């Protein structure tokens, strides 16, 4: 991972590699879609690390590791924030998105999450509602460096493509994705998860501990 993306400063405590997030976790048909993409990535693991099925996610919103009381955010704080988040989510009815096609970016292989029914931008509205819910629940949002870009990552870059050989490898991967990963998959967004996500620079990936699933809309049971 690029040093600028690391959560934990050199010499910092291991806990600094853990941050609270709200994620959407994909169902089996979306996991299957990314499994096909992983076959395209397999010959390019010198420049990209494919994301395992269990680690696939769409980041709705991250929060900082410490809350307004300067306490490290753990399961208790996330559960305390859940009611404020639930209130915001009750105003967002379940919606459909199109995921894909997959393309190579500067630091990852990713699939954009698109509104299934334009012009309503449901993914961005969900992000706004989650931000409000987390803030009302006492968590602190990181300063946004750019506009919200909803996506799922299929792989993370392992090296900077700064030599002619690596540039050629990246160009080859981009061409392979154009040939074999131009389709998309449609998914229904019915709930999100409060999680504690851990960054693993040595493995070039992220894992998460699921804390609580929260439904969209006014139903009380996620997934119904």
Image (tube, rainbow, N blue to C red):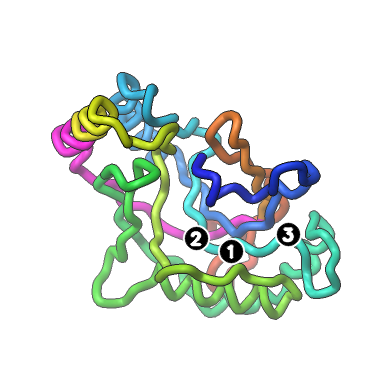
- The single residue placed furthest to the top in the displayed view is 43
What element does badge 3 sit on?
Answer: loop
Q: Earlier in the sequence, mark 3 or mark 1?
A: 3
Report the mark closest to the observer, 3 or 1. 3
Mark 1–mark 2 CB contact (< 8 Å): yes
Figure quadrant of residue 35: top left
Assess disc 3: are there few (<14), some (14-19) or many (≥20) residues with their C-alpha within 10 Å of its C-alpha: many
> Which residue does the numbered mark 2 point to in the structure image?
190
Q: Residue at x 77, y 46 (%)?
A: 12
What element does badge 2 sit on?
Answer: loop
**In this orientation, which residue lies closer to the viewer: 45 or 122?**
45
Residue 95: in magenta span? no
Q: Which residue is drawn at 62% across and 57% down?
A: 21
Q: Residue at x 31, y 65 (%)?
A: 115
Figure quadrant of residue 63: bottom right
Q: Residue 163: x, y in percent?
A: 29, 31
> Quadrant location of the C terminus?
bottom right
Assess disc 1: are there few (<14), some (14-19) or many (≥20) residues with their C-alpha within 10 Å of its C-alpha: many
What element does badge 1 sit on?
Answer: strand
> Which residue does the numbered mark 3 point to in the structure image?
65
> Which residue does the numbered mark 1 point to in the structure image?
215
Residue 54 left/right relative to 33: right
**In this orientation, which residue lies closer to the viewer: 164 or 173?**
164
Could you tell me how far apart the alpha carbons at marks 1 and 2 are, in whole angstroms? 6 Å
Could you tell me how far apart the alpha carbons at marks 3 and 1 are, in whole angstroms? 24 Å
């Amino acid at each position: 991972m690029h040093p600028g993306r690391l959560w934990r400063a050199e010499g910092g405590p291991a806990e600094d590699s853990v941050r609270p997030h709200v994620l959407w976790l994909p169902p089996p048909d979306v996991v299957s879609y990314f499994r096909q993409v992983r076959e395209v990535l397999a010959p390019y693991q010198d420049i990209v690390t494919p994301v395992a099925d269990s680690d696939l996610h769409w980041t709705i919103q991250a929060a900082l590791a410490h809350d307004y009381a300067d306490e490290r955010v753990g399961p208790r704080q996330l559960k305390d924030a859940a009611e404020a988040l639930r209130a915001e989510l009750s105003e967002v009815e379940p919606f459909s998105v199109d995921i894909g096609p997959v393309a190579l970016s500067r630091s990852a292989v990713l699939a954009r999450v698109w509104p299934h029914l334009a012009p309503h931008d449901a993914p961005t509205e969900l992000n706004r509602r989650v931000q409000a819910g987390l803030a009302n629940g006492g968590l602190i949002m990181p300063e946004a460096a750019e506009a919200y870009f909803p996506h799922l990552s299929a792989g993370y870059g392992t090296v900077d493509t700064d030599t002619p050989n690596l540039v050629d490898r990246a160009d080859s991967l981009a061409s392979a994705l154009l040939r074999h990963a131009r389709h998309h998959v449609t998914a229904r967004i019915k709930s999100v998860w409060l999680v504690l996500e851990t960054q693993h620079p040595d493995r070039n990936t992220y894992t998460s501990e699921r804390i609580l699933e929260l439904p969209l809309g006014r139903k009380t049971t996620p997934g119904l």
